Image (cartoon, rainbow, N blue to C red):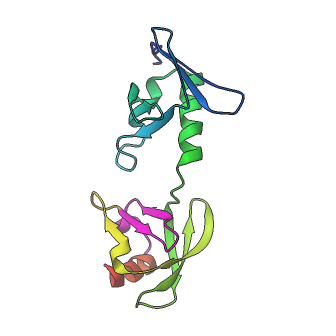
């Protein structure tokens, strides 16, 4: 069930989010920031001003009216790019640096893993892999990967 927030959110002519609080004060260039981007991506989102000061807190995206939720989700999607790996097809070498060929929710791609330290363990069983360009790839559940992918991944963990 949607509840009405005590603020308004809209886009200006340049596509930036504009926040108007219950006091009528307007803040330009508002940014939504996830508190738990991997563990709970749809819960705990702050709307912050350009200086990082919190203007509003969103407990759950589902609690927002459709128009506000769409604005927040669109802004988050434009700022965040974290492909989710569903399969590791091949690696060029089990020594680093190595080139990984993977299937993600954004299609097939390849990236260079500089070192094993670029594979970070998150709350089990999730992993975060940073490529040589700083793009982060998420594996939500390493145990849910197919056997071939798990075997490759085990060589690096």
Q: In this view, does 86 lie above or below 4?
A: below
Q: Is residue 40 above or below residue 82?
A: above
Tell me which corner region of the image, top left, top right, bottom left or bottom right, holds residue 124.
bottom left
Q: Is residue 3 above or below residue 156?
A: above
The picture places residue 39, in percent across and down from the top left corner, at: 34, 48
> Residue at the location (43% across, 39% down)?
33
> Which quadrant holds the C terminus?
bottom left
Residue 58 visible in image: no
Q: Nearer the viewer, residue 46 or 38?
A: 46
Q: In this view, does 50 lie above or below 20?
A: below
> Residue at the location (50% across, 35% down)?
31
Tell me which corner region of the image, top left, top right, bottom left or bottom right, holds residue 141.
bottom left
Q: In this view, does 140 lie to the left or right of 104?
A: left
In the rendered structure, does residue 129 fall within the stretch colored magenta?
yes
Question: Magenta region: which residues?
Answer: 127-146
Marks counted in the figure total: 0
Q: Which of 146 and 54 is in front in this view?
A: 54
> Which quadrant holds the N terminus?
top left
Residue farthest toward the front in the current orientation of the protein: 51
> Residue at the location (61% across, 72% down)?
109
> Residue at the location (54% across, 28% down)?
69
In the rendered structure, does residue 35 fall within the stretch colored magenta?
no
Q: Is residue 9 left or right of residue 5?
A: right
Residue 65 visible in image: yes
């Amino acid at each position: 069930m949607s509840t009405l927030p005590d603020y308004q959110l809209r886009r200006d002519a340049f596509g930036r989010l504009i926040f108007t609080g219950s006091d009528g004060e307007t803040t330009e260039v508002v940014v939504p920031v996830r508190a738990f981007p991997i563990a709970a991506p749809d819960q705990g989102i702050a709307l912050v001003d350009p200086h990082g000061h919190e203007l509003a807190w969103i407990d759950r995206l589902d609690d927002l009216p459709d128009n506000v939720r769409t604005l927040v989700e669109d802004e988050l999607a434009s700022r965040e790019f974290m492909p989710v790996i569903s399969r590791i097809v091949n690696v060029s070498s089990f020594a680093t640096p190595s080139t990984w060929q993977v299937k993600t929710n954004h299609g097939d791609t390849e990236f260079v893993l500089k070192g094993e330290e670029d594979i970070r363990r998150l709350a089990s069983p999730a992993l975060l892999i940073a490529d040589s360009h700083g793009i982060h790839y998420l594996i939500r559940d390493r145990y849910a990967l197919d056997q071939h992918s798990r075997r490759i991944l085990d060589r690096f963990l």
